[in-house]
Amino acid sequence: MTDAITIQNPRNRGGSTGHVLAKRSVTFTEIRTDARGYAPLRAAIATYLGISRGINCHPEQIFVCAGYRACLDLISHTLMGPGATCWLEEPGYFMARNALLEAGAQLVPVPVDDQGLDVAQGIARAPEAGFAVVTPTHQSPLGVSLSLPRRLALLDWANRQGSWIIEDDYDSEYRYQGKPLPALKSLDQQGRVLYTGTFSKVLFPGLRLAYLVVPAEQTAAFARQADRLHNHCPHLQQATVAAFLNEGHFARHLNKMRGLYARRRQWLVEALHQQVGGRLQIDPQAGGMHVVAGLGEGDDVQIARRAREVGIAVEPLSQWYLGDGGRQGLVMGFTNVVSAEQAVSVAVRLARVIA
């Protein structure tokens, strides 16, 4: 059995969701084709977002897509012209970076500090950018939250410029300390935020079911593109998740997994402090599904390669940067660390790699 640490949740819970669907006896005749996705699922998502993220939206504003990448593709085809300028967090999520580059966007890296995206730096570097991609709840990968003053500053900039903010709220469900800030979209009074969320992080990665919330005025334009792109999830899969939400299984599942992941996170952090505390700086993070450890010295790409050779799958932090000279560190998932003993075993092997 390998002790590999990954940055994704490896647990496949398809059996439980499939059981929910079987009990409801959903048939394909119940599922109507709609470019926006299965109507009961969109209604369930709207209810969930209102309760959990403070977002007031109508099901007509929600588009179900085959993963986060499909959400970005829908946005780029609907709103982005050739060569559109886009702020991107530095460091930032590589999938967003790659998708935007393929769409022909001109990316402007904007630094992230302990308050999240530095909005003033973004304005200084590209004041007239048409887009900004942000992960305000748990910045990807550093895990910091975008502070309220910066959220308001970002919204003010978008309102003045007529720019679009793409909010990636990818794992907001997993917060282990303190009170979470509301979604950026919940503060959006002028309809400048395009909100994305996903079920792959909280159910299982193979699900590839994400959703996009657009301003009411943009629903027709997005529907036309969604119909043309055909990037939908399988209908039966959508019905399964709708049942999971509507019958209360999702809320119970989240409560259980928060407790489980909090313990696993604590095991890994404590083991790293004990075994490699002098050589790694563990960043404090309130939530998420991975930890970030800064390297005092050494090449994170080489260290990550050697770690994989001994069964520890980590990501080099420097590769999350668009530009050169990124911070050296390791991005380490904890969701499949099943015991304190396993965490110690992993930390011991990592210490040997770093030595």
Image (cartoon, rainbow, N blue to C red):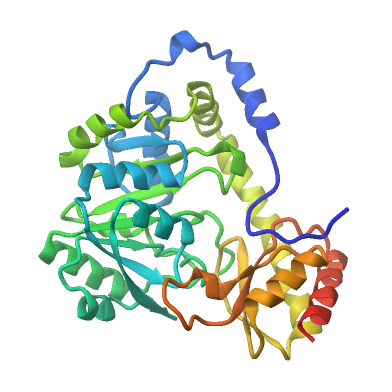
Where is residue 249 drawn, in percent x and y? 59, 35
Q: Is residue 50 visible?
A: no
Q: Is residue 211 above or below residue 149?
A: above
Q: Is residue 227 above or below residue 141?
A: above
Point out the image quarter for the C terminus: bottom right
- Residue at the spot 36% in from the left edge and 48% down from the top edge: 72
| Residue 335, quarter of the rendered image | bottom right
Q: Is residue 142 above or below residue 184?
A: below
The answer to which of 289 and 293 lies nearer the viewer is: 293
Query: Residue 351, position in %: x, y?
Result: 80, 81
Residue at coordinates 40% horizontally, 32% vertically from top-left? 231
Q: Quadrant of residue 39?
A: top left
Compared across the picture, whether 147 is left or right of 172 comes to left
Give the image location of residue 317, x and y in percent. Answer: 57, 73
Q: Quadrant of residue 30?
A: top left
Residue under the image location 56 percent in, 62 percent down: 288
In this rendering, is residue 1 above or below 294?
A: above
| Between 326 and 264, the one nearer to me in the picture | 326
